[in-house]
């Protein structure tokens, strides 16, 4: 009789344990589905092919007279430990010292004589004026909070206000990549604005985390690089308009489908690195961007090396880093960090190792 009771109790404990395990499995699966699905909402993903290239060598391209007007739009600041965005395993990275300068969130307005207004990246919308995490929705909001990343914005600096002041209505938005500081302005852009991303960018691991920025889009155009030309040393490059005024350069590493852009402006050629190089320090010291794996770090280094070689061969091209303007423009603008930003930057250091444990310096 005692053995029978013990057997019955054992079965109950086993069923209870299996129930707990089953509940944990289902909860984990549910969280996984919630976190890693739905980032693009119901948008159709359409392949987009650029027109036939108007040239096949950089020398002839750079000799052309620029037709684009370039207007940089600073839309806010990111408060963070900058080691989070650098490949800290790269040679020389250990010498990096955060100087406290702000990480600026840019959108770049390009005005084309026939194609109209075009944006590279979307900047931040007005929600960041009221909240340090702005319009980023869950579960993406949880990721930013855990990473210690915060945003700051002054009145009138949001993307809608900046565009309105210029009477600009962008027809196209070319995203360097899909991280929140590059997509956060999308909700306040005209509904007619067509959005373009690089090859494989939508499938990038962290881009599957929904942040709410793409939910209302009906279509997202993924640029097809099959027709790209090899513009050494830049590599795979597309003539966006077919007239040589704007070229998309595939620079994977920071993300799978990351893009940089070469623009022929009225003031001369400009290379927009995007986050293939966030900061001038990384450019000068040859330290690439953070990637989510060692392989991606290596890709990012190779992409940065190609861009730096281009700059050495063509010093007439100005370099706009992902989150800093060229040094001369920065000096003229008098860009500085607020004292209150320091506390947020220190706070973010607490989370930096949690944010990117694979990106720690090699000892």
Image (cartoon, rainbow, N blue to C red):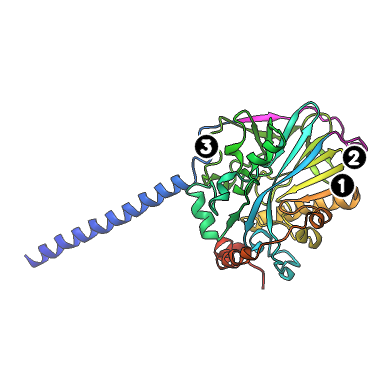
Q: Which of marks 1 and 3 is nearer the N terminus?
A: 3
- State if disc 1 and disc 2 touch (CB < 8 Å): yes
Q: Give whichever of 358, 147 is nearer the camera.
A: 147
Q: Name the residue under label 2.
A: 62
Q: Earlier in the sequence, mark 2 or mark 1?
A: 2
Q: Judge from the rendering whether residue 13 lies leftward or rightward of residue 216; answer left or right.
A: left
**Label of residue 317 in the image:** 1
Q: Judge from the rendering whether residue 250 lies leftward or rightward of residue 35; answer left or right.
A: right
Q: Distance between the Cα atoms at labels 2 and 1?
A: 9 Å
- The boundaries of the magenta stretch are 46-67
**Label of residue 231 in the image:** none
- State if disc 3 and disc 2 touch (CB < 8 Å): no
Q: Give whichever of 263, 236 is nearer the camera.
A: 263
- What is the x, y in percent for residue 99? 72, 67
Q: At numbered mark 3, what does the secondary structure look like: helix, strand or loop?
A: loop
- What is the x, y in percent for residue 154? 63, 51
Residue lying at 61% horizontally and 43% vertically, measured from the top left: 183
Q: Give whichever of 185, 360 is nearer the camera.
A: 185
Q: Name the residue under label 3.
A: 215
């Amino acid at each position: 009789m005692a053995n029978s009771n013990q057997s019955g109790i054992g079965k109950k404990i086993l069923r209870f344990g299996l129930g707990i395990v089953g509940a944990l499995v289902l909860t984990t699966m549910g969280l996984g589905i919630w976190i890693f699905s739905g980032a693009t909402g119901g948008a159709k993903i359409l392949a987009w092919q650029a027109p036939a290239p108007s040239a096949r060598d950089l020398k002839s391209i750079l000799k052309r007279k620029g037709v684009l007007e370039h207007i940089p739009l600073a839309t806010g600041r990111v408060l963070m430990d900058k080691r989070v965005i650098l490949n800290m395993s790269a040679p020389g990275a250990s010498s990096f010292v955060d100087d406290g300068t702000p990480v600026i969130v840019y959108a770049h307005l390009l005005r084309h004589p026939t194609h109209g207004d075009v944006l590279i990246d979307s900047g931040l919308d007005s929600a960041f004026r009221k909240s340090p995490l702005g319009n980023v929705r869950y579960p993406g909001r949880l990721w930013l909070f855990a990473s210690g990343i915060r945003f700051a914005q002054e009145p009138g600096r949001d993307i809608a206000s900046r565009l309105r002041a210029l009477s600009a209505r962008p027809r196209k938005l070319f995203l360097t990549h899909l991280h929140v500081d590059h997509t956060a302005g999308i909700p306040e852009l005209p509904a007619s604005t067509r959005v373009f991303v690089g090859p494989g960018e939508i499938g990038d691991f962290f881009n599957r985390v929904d942040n709410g920025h793409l939910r209302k889009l009906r279509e997202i155009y993924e640029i097809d690089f099959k027709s790209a030309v090899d513009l050494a040393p830049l590599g795979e490059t597309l003539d966006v308009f077919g007239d040589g005024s704007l070229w998309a350069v595939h620079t994977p590493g920071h993300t799978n489908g990351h893009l940089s852009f070469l623009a022929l402006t009225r003031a001369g050629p400009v290379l927009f690195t995007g986050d293939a190089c966030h900061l001038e320090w990384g450019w000068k010291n040859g330290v690439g961007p953070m990637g989510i794996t060692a392989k991606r770090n290596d890709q990012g280094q190779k992409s940065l090396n190609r861009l730096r070689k281009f700059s050495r061969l063509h010093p007439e091209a100005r370099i706009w880093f992902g989150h800093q303007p060229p040094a001369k423009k920065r000096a003229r603008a008098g860009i500085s960090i607020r004292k209150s930003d320091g506390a947020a930057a220190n706070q973010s250091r607490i989370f930096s190792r949690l944010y990117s444990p694979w990106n720690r310096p090699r000892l």
